[in-house]
Amino acid sequence: MRFRIFFLAGALAAVVMAPQASATPVFARQTGMACSSCHFQHFPLLNGFGRAFKSAGFTMMGGQAKVEGSGLSIPSTLNMAVVTTAGYEKSNQVAGTGLVKTAGDGVLYVPNSGGELSLFFGGRISENAGFLAEWNLGNAASSHSSAKMPIQYDTSSWFPFLPPGTRMGIVPFATDLEGASYGFEVLNTGASAVHQMVVASGMNGAHSGAISAQQYIATNGKAKGVAFVVSNTVGFINLTKFDQTGISGSAPANLGSTYLRVAGIFELAGWDVAAGAQMWSGSSTVGVAGGLPVATASTKATAIDGQMQGHLGEIPVGFYASFATAPKDTAVGTFQGNTYNLAGTATKSSFNVSSEVGVVPDKATLGAAMRFGKSGDGKADNAIMLTGTYKLAQNMMASLSFTSASGSYWFSNATQTGTTDTIGNTTYTINLFSAF
């Protein structure tokens, strides 16, 4: 889908569409553990322990006091956190004129004014249930708001043939930004926007679309539904029924779309390795006005992905790869076509590879990514991205990202949108992320 950005507010709203929902001290308070206990190199990437914590439904406790009784076991304090972002972004988009500005002029964003300002709360509900919610305190037009309630039971004793620690259950959820995979995902390939190498996704997803094929075809977005999950240390299955109205949509969900995720996790020569596949199908509501649905769209896409995380000597290194496709689906009447390839005349696809090296372990990283993509009109849409991060503290991280796109998509039609207001194929972002 092609975008047109006319003024500063629109550019700022796009800047802060970042995958930050897991990088919160809510669970550090509950478990009494440092952020680095769950994250590989830096947030929001997960390590093995972080996957286990998430798979257990956020129920693990540490030194925090509990209120307990017959059938009751909750933290004595409702854990909360604040997440903020601030920074500067500039692209080579055509600059604005007069008071009308674009990212071509360079835009500064701060918390609640282009940058994120979100309140997180959640934690253990019972021995087998947890909760996580994000309440966006900024502009509703760029809402990050999401909520989910994993209810997971250890069923390995029920089914002796399953690996120890196998859990089964459901995850009711709603999100305005993370898509159907928000219900349950633990890989760092961008299969869910929550977990990927960059924190600031960049205007129009410039950076995240360079590192993740799923993010390139835009499988993030509004979603509401329930995930049926089976997970253990060797992998997981997530079968989700959902629609596309999100947490802000007041209409009841019709759950006409289906999302299926299968992934395996194993160790290979000391490396933490995972690989999986995703499939989106069906069609469902995409818009709500006055509490009533106003349109539908299909959700058709497939993806395969994999990762390797480990050490080369003393240096932590992560490798990530993904491939995704979204077919065309012609819009008719109130049917808008395929959400992941709107107005497409051909199949949209992308193959992405990326790597990140901890040049100063637990402090600074350097990363790079490449995209080999095909836009919805069948034109080449490639990209290269370079990024660096530096931890000011475990819960504060500065990052610098640069992405440059190329290919016939960008040069066969210089205006892209049919106007003189081009998107721009080069984006620089300086971002400061804080969570407390």
Image (spheres, rainbow, N blue to C red):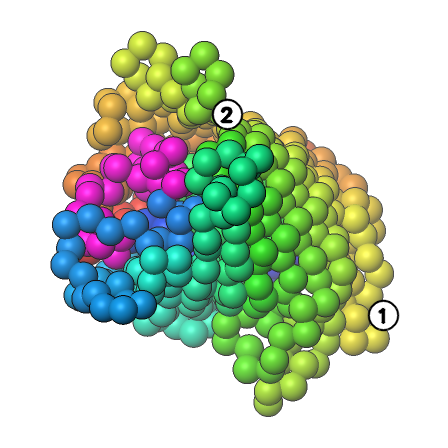
Residue name at image x 79 percent, y 45 percent: 347
**Quadrant including the N terminus:** bottom right
Q: Within the image, what quadrant is residue 295 found in?
A: bottom right
Residue carrying label 1: 332
Which is nearer the N-term, disc 2 or disc 1? Answer: 2
Question: For the residue marked with disc 2, what is the amino acid?
Answer: Phe
Q: Are marks 2 and 1 in contact (CB under 8 Å)?
A: no
Q: Residue furthest bottom?
A: 290
Q: Nearer the viewer, residue 405 or 397?
A: 397
- Toward the top, the furthest residue is 313
Q: Is residue 322 above or below residue 355?
A: below
Q: Is label 2 in a helix, a strand or a loop?
A: strand
Left or right, residue 86 beside residue 303: left
- Say if 391 sits above or below 240 in the image: above
Identify which residue is drawn at 23% across, 68% down. Answer: 69
Query: In the displayed structure, would residue 383 be above or below residue 20?
Result: above
Crowding around mark 1 (Cα neighbors within 10 Å: few <14, some 14 to 19, many 20+) is few
Where does the image place residue 240, in percent across and percent down from the top left? 62, 57
Secondary structure under badge 1? loop
Question: Which dot marks residue 266?
Answer: 2
Residue 336 horizontal/vertical position (percent): 76, 67
75 and 132: which is toward the camera = 75
Asked whether residue 289 is in view, the answer is: no
Tell me where the magenta segment starts and ends, as one range. Answer: 26-52
Q: Measuring 59% from the left and 44% from the top, which residue is drawn there?
A: 237
x and y, in percent, of residue 362 in the image? 24, 29
* Magenta run includes residue 114: no
Q: Amino acid at mark 1?
A: Val
Q: What residue is shown at x 46% (from left), y 36% (from top)? A: 164
Q: CA distance from mark 2 to mark 1?
A: 45 Å
Q: Quadrant of residue 255?
A: bottom right
x and y percent of residue 127 in the render?
Answer: 34, 58
